[in-house]
Image: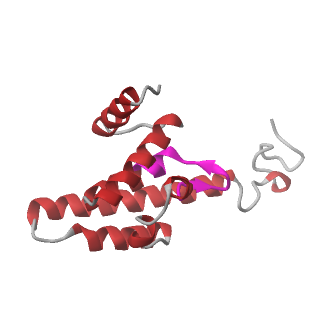
């Protein structure tokens, strides 16, 4: 459908999405996910090619660059605060949660694994797509604790 400006109602000057709208937010989240995926790829490459390199610094830099958070701060968050780092403009983003969880799993510390589990669980509840190992982990815990 065209408007008086001759363009579709979506692109007409008077109907442009507002700055800060959901589309801009989604683009921002997708950019964060892409950055985290690049960090994970670097960690996995270094595991194979340079196993003596500790991934902690790479993880810390990746979280800081993409989310503006320090690794030690993330590891000190409680469950609600941890899932809130994947909430933008009131919307939880399961794909971002999985990306952050994947990075935290590479840290290997108990605190990182706990937070990764919280993120995987929240992503699963929100209908996100999890790696098979993470899905099995979340499902086995839910079965053990009598949850669905």
In the rendered structure, the answer to whether residue 28 lies left or right of residue 148 reads right
Range shown magenta? 85-98
Q: Does the magenta segment cover residue 87?
A: yes
Q: Position of residue 59 (x, y in %)?
A: 32, 67
Nearer the observer, 110 or 3: 110
> Quick one: which residue is furthest to the front in this view?
145
Callout count: 0
> Quick one: which residue is furthest to the right in this view?
4
Q: Residue at x 32, y 53 (%)?
A: 113
Nearer the observer, 21 or 51: 51
Q: Does the magenta segment cover residue 123?
A: no
Q: Position of residue 96 (x, y in %)?
A: 47, 52
The quarter of the picture where the N terminus appears is top right
Q: Position of residue 101 (x, y in %)?
A: 38, 52
Q: Position of residue 7 (x, y in %)?
A: 78, 46
Q: Residue at x 26, y 58 (%)?
A: 106
Q: Residue at x 48, y 59 (%)?
A: 31
In the rendered structure, the answer to whether residue 58 lies left or right of residue 54 reads right
In the rendered structure, the answer to whether residue 134 lies left or right of residue 20 reads left
Q: Residue at x 49, y 42 (%)?
A: 122
């Amino acid at each position: 459908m065209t408007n008086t400006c001759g363009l579709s109602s979506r692109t007409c000057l008077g109907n442009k999405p507002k700055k800060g709208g959901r589309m801009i937010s989604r683009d921002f989240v997708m950019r964060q996910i892409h950055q985290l995926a690049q960090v994970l790829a670097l960690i996995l490459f270094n595991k194979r090619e340079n196993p003596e390199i500790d991934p902690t610094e790479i993880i810390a830099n990746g979280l800081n660059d993409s989310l503006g958070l320090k690794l030690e701060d993330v590891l000190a968050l409680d469950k609600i605060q941890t899932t809130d780092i994947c909430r933008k403009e009131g919307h939880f983003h399961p794909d971002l949660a999985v990306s952050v969880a994947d990075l935290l799993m590479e840290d290997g510390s108990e605190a990182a694994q706990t937070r990764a589990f919280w993120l995987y669980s929240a992503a699963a509840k929100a209908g996100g797509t999890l790696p098979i190992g993470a899905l099995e982990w979340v499902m086995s815990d839910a079965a053990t604790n009598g949850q669905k």
